[in-house]
Image (cartoon, grey):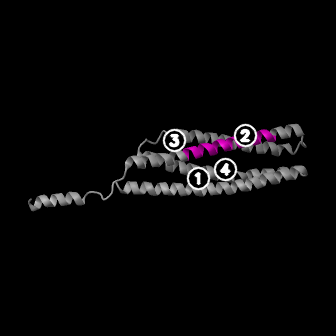
Amino acid sequence: MEFDEMKKIWDAQTNQPLYVIDEKALHNRIQSKMSGEFRLASMREWSTILFYLGAVGLMLGFNHFIHLKPGASIFVYLLAAWMFGTVVYIVVSRTRRIEASRRFDRSIHGDLDYAIWLAGYQMRLSLVIGFNFLPIGVILILFSWEVGGLFMACVVVILVSAILTFYVERKGYRASKSRKHALQVLKGKLESSR
């Protein structure tokens, strides 16, 4: 062999990547992360919707059958309206999330972008649900101040559950942020290997 032919073979070998990414396995892994985020978002949306609708029904039924003082019922209606508004917001967000899934193509990069978008959506949902208990807590405190007595114990239980929900949603926010960061790192690695 001549030197030029040997040099061509050597150059061809050194330009070869030292490792090869199994694209099928990587795509399956990304799809499993994406579907996990999708399922988690659906579960959180439905549980929040059902919880708030149940709470609205209980409050309105409680107010109707107990016949509280006329001035006290305004806080029950205000709280019911706030919770129903939250349900409407989550239903609209869910609809937008489902429509957004159609914007991403079904390639490795498209599924990865969608998984990152879903993790960001989870973060926003955690913030909305977590901080939603601030106005709910204020309305409950005003309600308990107006009514007093036995209702105070119910309000304390609801406020404690609100604080626990805020704590859990804060943990959920951090977990979603961590998952989003890991997905963004993977995206960076994939884009740098192109």
Question: Disc 3 vs disc 1: Cβ atoms closer than 8 Å?
Answer: no
Question: At label 2, which amino acid type do we have?
Answer: Leu
Q: Around disc 2, counting alpha carbons within 10 Å, would you say few (fewer than 14), some (14 to 19), or many (20 or more)? A: some
Q: Secondary structure at mark 1?
A: helix
Q: Nearer the viewer, residue 3 or 111?
A: 3
Distance between the Cα atoms at labels 2 and 1?
23 Å
Task: Identify residue for label 4.
Answer: 129
Q: Around disc 4, counting alpha carbons within 10 Å, would you say few (fewer than 14), some (14 to 19), or many (20 or more)? A: many
* Disc nearer the start of the sequence (4/3): 3
Task: Identify residue for label 2.
Answer: 53
Q: Nearer the viewer, residue 100 or 9?
A: 9
- Residue 3, located in which quarter of the rendered image? bottom left
Instruction: Give left or right: position of 30 versus 86.
Output: left
Question: Disc 3 vs disc 2: Cβ atoms closer than 8 Å?
Answer: no
Magenta span includes 54: yes
User: Is residue 84 shown to the viewer in this render?
Assistant: no
Residue range (magenta): 37-59
Question: At label 1, which amino acid type do we have?
Answer: Met
* Disc nearer the start of the sequence (2/1): 2
* Disc nearer the start of the sequence (3/2): 2
Task: Identify residue for label 1.
Answer: 123
How far across and how far down the image is residue 58, in percent? 80, 40
User: Looking at the rendered structure, which numbered label has been put on residue 172?
Assistant: none
- State the quadrant of the N terminus: bottom left
Q: Around disc 1, counting alpha carbons within 10 Å, would you say few (fewer than 14), some (14 to 19), or many (20 or more)? A: many
* Disc nearer the start of the sequence (4/2): 2
